[in-house]
Image (cartoon, helix red, strand yellow):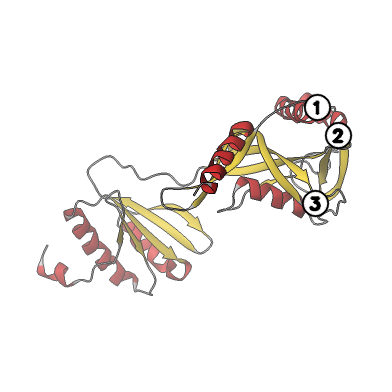
Amino acid sequence: MDTRAQQIPLLEGEIDNYDGVTVTMVESMDAEVFTESLRASLSHWRDEGKKGIWIKLPLGLANLVEAAVSEGFRYHHAEPEYLMLVSWISETPDTIPANASHVVGAGALVINKNTKEVLVVQERSGFFKDKNVWKLPTGVINEGEDIWTGIAREVEEETGIIADFVEVLAFRQSHKAILKKKTDMFFLCVLSPRYYDITEQKSEILQAKWMPIQEYVDQPWNKKNEMFKFMANICQKKCEEEYLGFAIVPTTTSSGKESFIYCNADHANRLKATRDQASASL
């Protein structure tokens, strides 16, 4: 490295476990100054054997995007408050992971055990608008939200009913379903309502009601669309027979973060009972 390059301030970055570097830009910087610092930093990181370089640019530093791209960076992903760019500077094969490729959605089979009815809605907008189809409450799970809490939130938002998660009955995967690019993962969940009085979310829900499970299954839409037919059949089996799904077992990751395992409901209960017994013996 020449003397002039040594005098150029390097960009500060956080080293990861894969010989990568993440630079989080915070302070304003002239594009030309940034380019010089970036070039010097890339040379330094190559000498150190670094591989993937990540640059996080907040909205206020959008003036640096062109400079980064001109030095070999590409877009990786964007969030409302920042853009992430990446570059692979090693001679080894590029192993930078792709941007998040899946969207997680869920549907709620909320069962009135007294009447064998299920909670259904008609939507004001979206794919089912004006199709006269009664469907289960559904929604997208938010970032950082667990499936079991997200679907309970959706039920309350759409119908005003507070319901407790019981189990996951089934899930399905559909590729290129979101923006003709992302994969949609959809989880069919069972919830138990605490009460039965409905208050529709007027902005999104046209109507909501309790419907006999057979009437829900027999809708023309469910009969002529195989995937919906299969899902409706699973719902009916749960309402009319003993049908176990995946219940949750609260646990923690190796780093201490809260997490949840979804497994056979009987086994989940045994796991929780075993842990409770171990805790009681301490």
SS state under label 3: loop
Where does the N terminus fall, quadrant-wise? bottom left
- At label 3, the amino acid type is Ile
Gap between marks 2 and 1, in whole Å?
A: 8 Å
Q: Which residue is mark 2?
A: 116
Q: Which mark is residue 240?
A: 1
Name the side, left or right, on which 112 lies relative to 139. Answer: right
| Residue 58 appears left or right of 265 | left
Identify the residue under disc 3.
161
The reply to whether callout 2 and callout 1 are in contact (CB within 8 Å) is: yes
Q: Is residue 177 visible?
A: no
In terms of image quadrants, where is residue 73? bottom left
Q: Is residue 182 above or below residue 170?
A: below
Amino acid type for the residue under numbered disc 2:
Lys
Distance from disc 3 to disc 2, alpha carbons, whole Å, reads 17 Å
- Residue pushed farthest front? 281
Q: Disc 3 or 1, which lies upstream in sequence?
A: 3
Q: In what element is the residue under mark 1?
A: helix
- Horizontal and vertical percent position of residue 272: 58, 41
Residue 127 percent across, percent down from the top left: 74, 42
- Foreground residue, 235 or 43? 235
Q: Is residue 265 above or below residue 164?
A: above
> Residue 75 in the image: x percent, y percent?
42, 53
Relative image position of residue 74 (x, y in whole percent): 38, 52
Residue plotted at (83% across, 44% down): 122
Residue at point 31%, 54% (across, down): 16
